[in-house]
Image (spheres, rainbow, N blue to C red):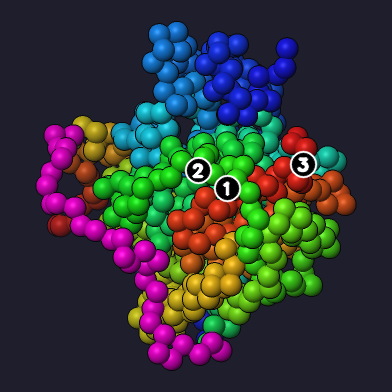
Amino acid sequence: MAVDNQTVEQIAFLSRLKIDENKLEETKDEFNKILNWVAELQEVNTDNVEQLVSVNEENLFCREDVVKDGNIKNEVLKNVPLSEFGYFAVPKVVE
Amino acid sequence: MTDLTDLTIAQVISGLSKKDFSATELTKAYIKNMQNGRKYNAYVTECVETALKQAKVSDEKYLNNTARQLEGVPLGIKDLFCTKGIKTTACSQILENFVPEYESTVTANLLNAGALFLGKLNMDEFAMGGSNETSFFGPCINPWSKDVDLISGGSSGGSAAAVCAKMCAAATGTDTGGSIRQPAAYCGITGVKPTYGRCSRYGIIAFASSLDQAGPMAKDVTDCAILLKHMAGFDEKDSTSAKIEVPDFVKVLGSDIRGLKVGIPIEYRSDKLNLSIAKAWDLAADMLRKRGAEIVDISLPHTKYALPVYYIIAPAEASSNLARYDGLRYGKRIDGNSLDEMYINSRTAGFGKEVKRRIMVGTYVLSAGYYDAYYVKAQKVRRLIRQDFISAFEKCDIILAPTSPTTAFAIGDKSMQSNPINMYLNDVFTVSVNLAGLPAMSLPTGLCEQGLPIGMQLIGKPFDEETIFKTGLALEQDANFKRK
């Protein structure tokens, strides 16, 4: 299952990354090397094997859904690159 | 007078309690080493003033007999742990100026026990790497280097180098596929990756959440036992942290290992294994045998699939975890004409090459059409890998294996740079442990022909770090490794 340049660009967009035009070929080659290597898994028989989603399924718990802090707007906004009127500021999205 | 920075944590606590020296003197001695050791590039942020302030508080507590259990012990913290008011970057440009407003649970536990922090330690960007070379702040240099600068290992390379060069009494690390054990091996120190769930992941910048685990990196086995006791514990802020009591690991140290069944996995005997490491492995087995342990051959048949499974699951989880770096709420922002353009500009400028590679691989294996073939398949083989260990532990109590197939290599090594898979292969003996959620320790047992440290790994049953600690101490005493 080799990928082509177009697929690499599509994956980059899904990842919200941009690949330099002149790095595209190199990126594709590395990508295919990794995909070929992990394809080794296809030889393992996994019929009737369940996915392992978590190693500690027995321990998972839910805590009560209650607020224990709050009123920390300033702390939340402390590392914001750009804020306006106490909000996160995004580029204009509506005309 | 002996150099205070030669002392282990156990000796430091005893010396401070008897008032042989003060926490301030001790901290100053470490600060001096930090400043003399800047060439190693182990620290990315130094916290000299706050450390000295904390040391003064500790001295007062010793004077009025209110000292806590780790009072005045100077630690280094991997830059993946959020530390309130102290810059935390994950060694990525995207978090270059990030100052957390909260403290990770593990570091909070250490602070509450009286420890003080000397600074934040270098690592591979977002813990993605095995050589510390992907750090935005440049590679950390292995203090064992002679003519050529060698890698410290990764991702917790700064932690391993700082402990090795006596620039902190001990350090915290995190381990997703070997990131505590492999650098510990390369730098000749001791490191423990606890059972998944033993330490809270709250406030540790996430890489692959089903694999990440924090652990101690220290001068010896006893110090790791002391530290882990304080780092571990249930935390309601991490739903995967285990509601299991944390034993006093120090108590088991020194108990004998007669009758203990030590498993040797036959699949780890590959021809790629460096000869002196194979020899050190046999020697370590012999040492345990002479102590009355029984050595048994075991099989972990799916070993060869562990790396491919890891390099599907870890990038998949990373691509999801790192989606949060959007230039909007924190981290680097580079504007664009639309929201998407801003995301793309910020992330493209902020992430390094290896991180981008893993995000893209992760995105691919999770994308429609490939999800079943890659991701689901990997999750199934992951179960088989864990099953291998469960079956092996019916025949043995603990597993002995090398930590890494080689010793430390040169910074910028050509074969590692030419193909990312070559770098991934260094984790061949460590990743299975993370996939199965098991505890493991790496400790130095000897030197290779080039005079570089060799690490041995002890792998235990889930939540049985105690057997690892008592076996580790026995091995440490018999190997008599000379710390740098």
For label 1, the residue is B469
Q: Is residue B484 left or right of residue B54?
A: right
- Residue at point 65%, 45% (across, down): B473
Return the x and y of residue B13 as percentages of the image width and height: 54, 23
Return the x and y of residue B14 as percentages of the image width and height: 56, 21
Q: Is residue B296 left or right of residue B170?
A: right
For label 3, the residue is B480
Which one is in front, B123 or B113? B113
Q: Is residue B153 left or right of residue B433?
A: right
- Residue at point 46%, 88% (across, down): A46
| Quarter residue A73 falls in | top left
Chain designation of label 2: B
Report the amino acid beneath label 2. Answer: Phe
Q: Quadrant of the C terminus of chain B?
A: top right
The tag earlier along the polypeptide, 2 or 3, is: 2
- Residue at point 57%, 52% (across, down): B468
Q: Which residues are magenta?
A: A43-72
| Quarter residue B190 falls in | top right
Compared to residue A9, the image places residue A59 above or below, namely: above
Report the amino acid beneath label 3. Answer: Asn
Compared to residue B108, the image places residue B306 above or below, namely: below
Which one is in front, A27 or B139? B139
SS category of the residue bearing label 2: helix
Is residue A48 highlighted in magenta?
A: yes
For label 2, the residue is B249
Are labels 1 and 2 on one chain?
yes
